[in-house]
Image: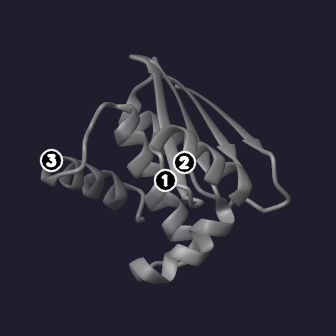
Amino acid sequence: MSLSITNTTKGKLPRLPFTKMANAVLGKDYECSLVVVSSLKSQELNRTYRQKDTPTNILSFPLDTNEGEIFLDLKKAREDAPNFDRTYTNFIGFLFIHALFHLKGHDHGTKMENAEKKVRTLFRI
């Protein structure tokens, strides 16, 4: 597992075992990048790729079977965390795990939720 993290903002990324979480979901042969972006950038990406003209907390883009990118908006995640009855740090972990399963090819549904729950339990998220 190769995980690169780039923070393009002044926001501080919470201390979470990002590499271990990515390895648990994607396996050792996957290359993933996590990019922390501003709300302006998340809105631009959301508009371009999902036709939704609002900022979003996280986006994932599989590039091929063993490579993908995740874009995280810390400001939007902080705003959204209370809506999910989660702390900010816990919600970042929750979002990251969710994005990892999208990179793995999962779509929303019971199967994805059950798989996410196992990983969240493992990392106490």
Tell me the mark number nearer the camera, choosing from 2 and 3.
2
Considering the numbered disc 2 on the image, is that residue within a helix, a strand or a loop?
helix
Residue 113, by quadrant, is bottom left
Label 3 or label 1, whichever comes before in sequence order: 1
- Pointer 2 and pointer 3: residues touching (CB < 8 Å)? no
120 on left or right of 113: right
User: Marks 2 and 3, Cα distance to the nearest angstrom?
Assistant: 25 Å
Residue at position x 61%, y 73% in the image:
78
Where is residue 62? Give x, y as percent.
45, 27
Name the amino acid type tagged 3.
Answer: Lys
Which residue lies most toward the left here?
110
Q: Residues within 10 Å of mark 1 (few under 14, many from 20)?
A: few
User: Marks 1 and 2, Cα distance to the nearest angstrom?
Assistant: 6 Å
Residue at position x 50%, y 38% in the image:
49
Query: Which circle marks residue 30 in the picture?
Result: none
Q: Which residue is mark 2?
A: 46
Instruction: Tell me: residue 25, above or below residue 115.
Output: above
- Pointer 3 and pointer 1: residues touching (CB < 8 Å)? no
- Pointer 1 and pointer 2: residues touching (CB < 8 Å)? yes
Q: Which residue is mark 3?
A: 111
Instruction: Tell me: residue 1, above or below residue 116.
Output: above
Q: Which residue is mark 1?
A: 52
Q: Nearer the viewer, residue 122 or 101?
A: 101
